[in-house]
Image (spheres, rainbow, N blue to C red):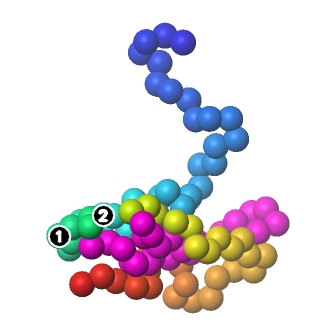
């Protein structure tokens, strides 16, 4: 590979929304509120998206801050679309 060639995604890497993307949204939210990282413990966020074309019509996931890491606590692929209001980034448990 040439030095100026951008790195390629790993084999099998997905281009759809991933738990790491949700963790980045959560961090942006918490940083936007100027909450120090040492106070993120217990914060929990969710993300849902529809519009799938394969056997699954939607995905729903949740992440929670535990012992300094973002942990996926729920990952649900659904064969039916999400209900109104379940799409996008949502706060489940905020921190003060």
Is 65 positioned to the left or the right of 51 in the image? left
Furthest residue to the front? 67
| Marks 1 and 2, the one that precedes in the sequence | 2
Is 61 positioned to the left or the right of 79 in the image? left
Residue drawn at (34%, 83%) of the image: 94
Give residue 60's position: percent from left, percent from top.
61, 74
Q: Which of 2 and 85 is in front in this view?
A: 2
Residue drawn at (68%, 35%) of the image: 11
Above-or-below relation of 52 to 85: above
Furthest residue to the top? 2
Image quarter where the N terminus lies is: top right
**Residue that badge 1 annotates:** 34
* Neighbours of disc 2 within 10 Å: few (<14), some (14-19), many (20+): few
* Neighbours of disc 1 within 10 Å: few (<14), some (14-19), many (20+): few
Whether residue 11 can be seen here: yes
Above-or-below relation of 38 to 82: above
Give residue 32's position: percent from left, percent from top.
22, 68
Q: Which of 58 and 35 is in front in this view?
A: 35
Q: In which quarter of the image is residue 86?
A: bottom right
Furthest residue to the left? 34
Residue drawn at (44%, 85%) of the image: 92
Q: Distance between the residues labelled 1 and 2?
A: 10 Å
**Magenta region:** 39-67
Is 86 positioned to the left or the right of 23 in the image? right
Mark sitting on residue 25: none
* SS type, badge 1: loop
Q: Which of 86 and 64 is in front in this view?
A: 64
Give residue 28's position: percent from left, percent from top.
30, 64
Residue drawn at (50%, 76%) of the image: 46
**Residue that badge 2 annotates:** 28
* SS type, badge 2: helix
């Amino acid at each position: 590979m040439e030095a100026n060639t951008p790195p390629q995604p790993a084999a099998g890497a997905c281009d759809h929304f991933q738990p790491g993307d949700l963790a980045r949204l959560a961090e942006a939210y918490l940083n936007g509120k100027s909450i120090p990282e040492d106070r993120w413990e217990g914060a929990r966020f969710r993300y849902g998206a529809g519009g799938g074309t394969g056997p699954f019509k939607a995905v729903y996931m949740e992440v929670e801050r535990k012992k300094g890491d973002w942990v996926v606590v729920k990952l649900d692929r659904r064969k039916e679309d999400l209900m109104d209001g379940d799409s996008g980034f949502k706060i489940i448990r905020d921190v003060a």
